[in-house]
Image (tube, rainbow, N blue to C red):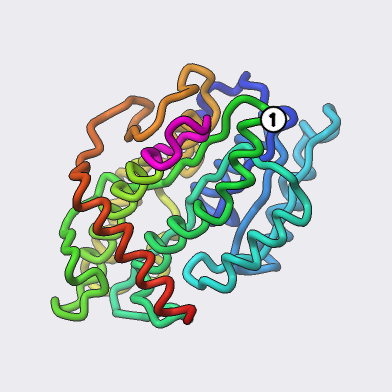
Amino acid sequence: MDAAPSTDLTGKVIVVTGATGGIGKEIARGLFRRGATVIIGGRDPERNSAVSMELSNMPENRVRDGYEVHAFQVDVAHQASLHAFRAAVQERFDAIDGLVNNAGAWFTDRRESPDGVELTLATNVLGPHKLSELLTPLLQAGARARGEARVVNIVSGIAGNYEADDLQFTRRPYDGYRAYAQSKAALRMLTWGLAARLEGTAVTANAAAPGFVRTDFNRNAHGFRAGMINFMARLMAVPPEKGAATPLWVTTAPELAGATGKYFDGLKEKDGGFSDRAAIADLERRCVELERARTA
């Protein structure tokens, strides 16, 4: 399923994190098919290069000029890596037209990022929050040049267990599934906050859920729950190309121009919840404090 495949993105530059496999790779492929220049952000340079070569060799590239794929290394859970990624993108491009924050993970055991932050929180929350901030000037330049730019945060239908005073599960017993659900609730909240801050700039921010998708997302998880999720995935999950449909639609659809602060699932707008303004402002403050503490 390739929603709105006729949308022409020629001349647009769009960043996709976590684009070396699964949903992210299919999002990048879909954007490339539409004519966009795609910037792949991933942790593994070899996988980055392999996906870049794979997309560059797609049949469309031999038919139509102007297709480009760029791959830059980034670990979204590491603040220094995010700054280096921004510098690499900015060195090559004066403006970008989109950012798809797709990189994400969950872990059954508690781990910490290179900055000492619980790894699910660092990957799924602090990473996209900081990268969106770092790339905002380039997104605003893209909006001025071509009318609009879009940030799309890949969230999940699984969202909850949010406790502002225990974002890193230092008080609660660690539960990877609950940490993941909390992180995806927090990412929705940060999406609404980003949309509010960007209001009037022609840069929009929305959240898109891909659904239950058959990928290697559980590679960092083990135990009974991870086993059950893998079993159910074999029975019920959709392939990555179908999971990419809603994020692609939100990133590219002309009919969604100007839509911001929205939640989309199954190619439809739905109530994303988690919209308490005070809670969102509190989470934004906590994110800034964590970033400052870890980079001081």
Nearer to me, 202 or 127: 202
Q: How many marks?
A: 1
Quick check: 208 above or below 168? above
Badge 1 density bin: few <14, some 14–19, many ≥20, Cα 10 Å: few
Residue depicted at x 48% and y 39% = 244
Residue numbers of the magenta segment: 195-207
**Is 190 left, or right, of 177 in this rendering?**
right
The x, y position of residue 22, in whole percent, is 51, 51
Quick check: 106 above or below 97? below
Nearer to me, 88 or 154: 88
* Residue type of the residue flagged with mark 1: Ala
In this view of the protein, can residue 242 be seen by the observer? no
Residue depicted at x 35% and y 64% = 287
Picture quadrant of residue 183:
bottom left
In this view of the protein, can residue 227 be seen by the observer? yes
The x, y position of residue 181, in whole percent, is 24, 57
Quick check: 5 above or below 45? above
The x, y position of residue 149, in whole percent, is 57, 34
Residue 196 shown in magenta: yes
Nearer to me, 169 or 144: 144
Residue depicted at x 19% and y 64% = 164
Q: Which residue is mark 1?
A: 145
Quick check: 267 above or below 42? above
Picture quadrant of residue 157:
top left
